[in-house]
Image: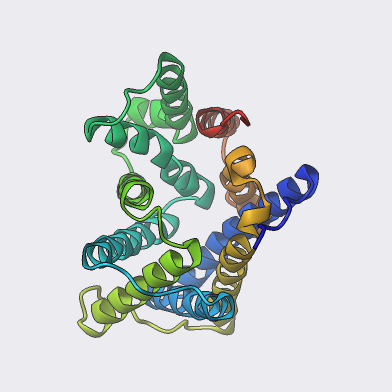
């Protein structure tokens, strides 16, 4: 059976841009839900559960096999736990700092993946990659307004420090998840791998919630707007994630994937329009430097 023909590039780029905007809007909805006392674990539980159901339907429709070797199951379990931790970290960051900044910090994952791959015996980053990594870090310092924070007379805001720390942890954990996916689970169908990963996230969130590991983690929204935001974050994430895997073979991901890095830019725009989260001019410049550097770092010339 021949694989479906790739979509015209301008159509593929538009679809990927729309998916990036959908993911960003989902994080905006998450911030609104958290502002109405929605439990973080409840948000993870709903998001993972609904998306796993959608992917399960896709797996059944395609007839993908669920047979895995024993060692593969272990790596799959590890991947699911890493994504559960990453989800917890990014939602914790979104709840504390502007959404655009949280997404910028989490988008450091490609840098951490390159360094992790090198540390585990992979190729050393090229001079071009090293220069781009340096550019990204400088841009991130500007986006986070670190010079102003360090020059200020008052102590750094605790929530700002916590939010940035959660974002950095999320980026590091996601880099580990990407390494496991690329080196240990690359032979699995993407839909099966993603479905099983989200089932582990669902189970981990449920266990943590019922075990009371995070106080208030399973709290219900305290207002109708909180319920609406919770529903939006689930639908936006589920629709974008499922669409990505339905069309993945037609989107020429190796060539067009850098388009997905516009998510922090969309988060900046939506955060301003919906939440009133306005960054300073220097922060915006820093954010654009980060996004540009990541696009260049992840871009692969078509062969």
Q: Residue furthest front?
A: 1
Q: Is residue 223 visible?
A: yes
Image position, residue 120 (x, y; %) = 22, 35
Q: Is residue 278 left or right of residue 48?
A: right
Residue shown at the point (28%, 36%) measured from the top left: 116
Residue shown at the point (65%, 46%) measured from the top left: 252
**Relative to residue 158, is residue 141 depicted above or below?**
above
Image position, residue 65 (x, y; %) = 44, 74
Q: Nearer the viewer, residue 60 or 276?
A: 60
Q: Quadrant of residue 40?
A: bottom left
Q: Is residue 240 left or right of residue 43?
A: right
Q: How many dots with numbers?
A: 0
Q: Residue furthest top?
A: 127
Q: Nearer the viewer, residue 81 or 212?
A: 81
Residue shown at the point (46%, 27%) measured from the top left: 136
Q: Quadrant of residue 226?
A: bottom right
Image position, residue 23 (x, y; %) = 58, 58
Q: Quadrant of the C terminus?
A: top right
**Relative to residue 217, is residue 293 depicted above or below?**
above
- Give the colour scheme of this rendering: rainbow
Image position, residue 13 (x, y; %) = 72, 46
Residue shown at the point (36%, 76%) measured from the top left: 202
Q: Is residue 165 visible?
A: no
Q: Quadrant of the N terminus?
A: bottom right
Q: Is residue 162 left or right of residue 261?
A: left
**Relative to residue 160, is residue 218 depicted above or below?**
below
């Amino acid at each position: 059976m021949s694989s479906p023909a790739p979509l015209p590039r301008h159509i593929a780029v538009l679809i990927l841009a729309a998916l990036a905007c959908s993911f960003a809007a989902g994080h905006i909805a998450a911030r609104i839900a958290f502002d109405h006392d929605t439990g973080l674990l409840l948000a993870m539980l709903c998001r993972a559960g609904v998306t796993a159901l959608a992917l399960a339907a896709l797996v059944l429709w395609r007839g993908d096999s669920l047979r895995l070797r024993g060692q593969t199951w272990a790596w799959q379990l590890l991947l699911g736990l890493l994504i559960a931790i990453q989800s917890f970290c990014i939602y914790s960051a979104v709840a504390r700092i502007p959404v655009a900044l949280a997404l910028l910090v989490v988008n450091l994952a490609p840098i951490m993946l390159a360094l992790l791959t090198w540390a585990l015996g992979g190729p050393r980053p090229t001079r071009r990659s090293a220069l781009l990594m340096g550019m990204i870090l400088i841009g991130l310092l500007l986006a986070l307004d670190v010079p102003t924070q360090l020059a200020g007379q008052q102590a750094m805001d605790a929530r700002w420090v916590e939010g940035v720390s959660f974002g950095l942890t999320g980026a590091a954990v996601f880099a580990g998840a990407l390494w496991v996916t690329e080196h240990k689970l690359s032979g699995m169908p993407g839909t099966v791998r993603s479905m099983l990963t989200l089932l582990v996230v669902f189970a981990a969130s449920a266990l943590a919630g019922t075990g009371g590991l995070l106080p208030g983690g399973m709290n219900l929204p305290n207002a109708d707007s909180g319920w609406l935001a919770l529903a939006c974050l689930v639908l936006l994430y589920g629709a974008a994630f499922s669409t990505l895997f339905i069309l993945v073979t037609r989107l020429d991901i190796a060539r067009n994937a850098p388009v997905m890095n516009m998510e922090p830019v969309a988060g900046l725009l939506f955060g301003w329009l919906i939440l009133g989260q306005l960054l300073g001019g220097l922060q915006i410049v820093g954010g654009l430097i980060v996004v540009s550097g990541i696009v260049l770092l992840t871009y692969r010339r078509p062969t």
